Image (cartoon, coloured by chain):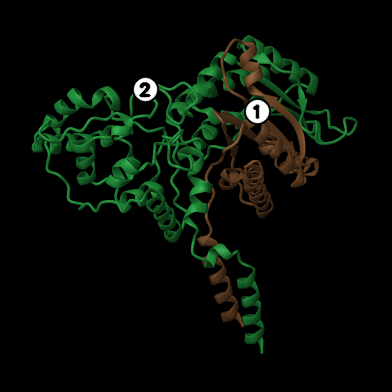
Amino acid sequence: MNGIRILLSLSAILAALPLTVCAAPDGRALYVEHCSACHQMEGQSGIGLPLIREKLEDMSDVYLTKTIRHGRPGRVMPAFQRMSDAQVGAVVGFLRESSGTTGRIYSDERLAGNVERGAAVYQEHCVKCHGADGSGEGMGTGVTTSRERSFLIMPASISNSGFLASASDQMMRRVVSVGRKSSGMPGFGRGKLADDELDDVIAYVRSLGEQQATAEKLDAEERPTHVFESPYDFDQTVNNVKAALTGANFRIFPDRMLEQGLIDEFSVNTRQVGIRFCNFNVLYGMLKIEPRLGVVLPCRITVMEQPDGTILLVIPNLRVVSRWFNNDELVGLWDRMEETFTGIIDEVTL
Amino acid sequence: MTRYLSLLMLLLVILSGMSVRADDMLMGRIPMKAEIVLEYVRTSVEEHGYKIAHLQLCDGGMTDFGYKTDFYRVVFFGKVEEVRMISADYPELVSYLPLKIAVIAEKNETLLTVLNPEALKPYFDDERIQIQLGRWRNDLVSIFDDVRRATGKHLVAVD
């Protein structure tokens, strides 16, 4: 009897589960949700690289699948590691269907090129666009097409660990041979480079992956915010914060209470204030690198009086926040900004 | 009895593991001008029970300083009872409140971007805040879906 009851409960739970768990995943819906913001609906590119017929024809399903799984660490595209195999397969299926391509099949066999000779070939033909370290020359990774960037279509970061984990040597060789008309990359096949030179340059690109610098890993102890106790009372702490920010050349916006706008003005807790500040020169430079920064703007230090009279200063940990954007260009800048914030807090709590 | 319960728990663990984990940033592209999309965002945010705290004009500030930029707004919103719960019990999280959605013009299209509250989950152990962060994430995804649907209908109506 108990068994039947349990089975009935189980059936009820299963019935309540979202249909998506059981139904075949909808590739188009998944593409709209996860990919279209960067690659656009027709794959025209934007923040992400173009996903057009010319490119998809050369890409294998294995490459697309691994690219979705690994992403491009530090280059905006996230790794979709928690998607089910069926969902990733559905996205790849949608790309195939919408582009009318079937994709090539490449062997996993490594090419036996010579790295030193490949370096010379790379310097002559590839460095101008892909950069000395293969990370893609120029500013603007992850920037929308309507904003300033070094290239309309950013050269692929061919030394990126996500790319190297996804692309087989044979696929890279094919792309180097035929080029990419859509992004202005010339083809180096048909006698332009000898067969062994093609193998050599692929071997060199593989070696670049081992040299690539990646953003410093965070300590396990790192928290998403810093919380400090002020030795001063609420008003003095607020004044100290503003004086320190002015000294550090930040423009201070009018105060906003944490609850302001969420409840009538007479009920707002006035002992929780966000001191908002900005340096427009720095901000403008950062938005060229990462247009999504608005989700953490403006910079803010929150001063809160706790019920026991303790005054807390709360600021976001920029080292943690910057890594959520998966944009290494931003990480370096924000790690330096974090030092500025630390200096301000030191001054305030002295 | 214990065996059935163990089986049930195991099944639930397997099924929950099949769900898609969100990324640290949630993004959406809407094929419509940002000024119009902003209005749909505001409507959907309110329909989800949130109050708009204020609207930040990022482009306005930059233009004042002589920089050229496209339409760029940030919508701040929240529920006062949630803000009070967080400031009382999880003061470490106040930096991420109110919630905010960036509305960014890209030519005639609009990008919506938001920090996924679930990015904060690994930093907290207790179930209460895990549920809250998950709820915010679900609401944000639902707001994005609402805007997609609403703007889709609008496009059809215009055609």
Q: Are marks 2 and 1 on the same chain?
A: no
- Give the crowd class for mark 2: few <14, some 14-19, many >=20 residues within 10 Å: some
Residue A217 visible within the image: yes
Specify the chain shown as green: A
Residue A259 lies left or right of residue A162; in this view the side is right
Q: Colour of chain B?
A: brown
Q: A289 or B46, which lies in front?
A: B46
- Residue B146, compared with residue A142, is above or below; it is below
- Give the crowd class for mark 1: few <14, some 14-19, many >=20 residues within 10 Å: many
Looking at the picture, how far across and down is residue A71, in whole percent?
A: 40, 43
Question: What's the residue type where badge 2 is placed?
Answer: Gly
The circle on residue B100 is none
Residue at label 1?
B73
Tell me where residue A279 sits by quadrant: top right
Looking at the picture, how far across and down is residue A344, in whole percent?
A: 62, 18
Residue at label 2?
A138
Looking at the picture, how far across and down is residue A52, in whole percent?
A: 37, 41
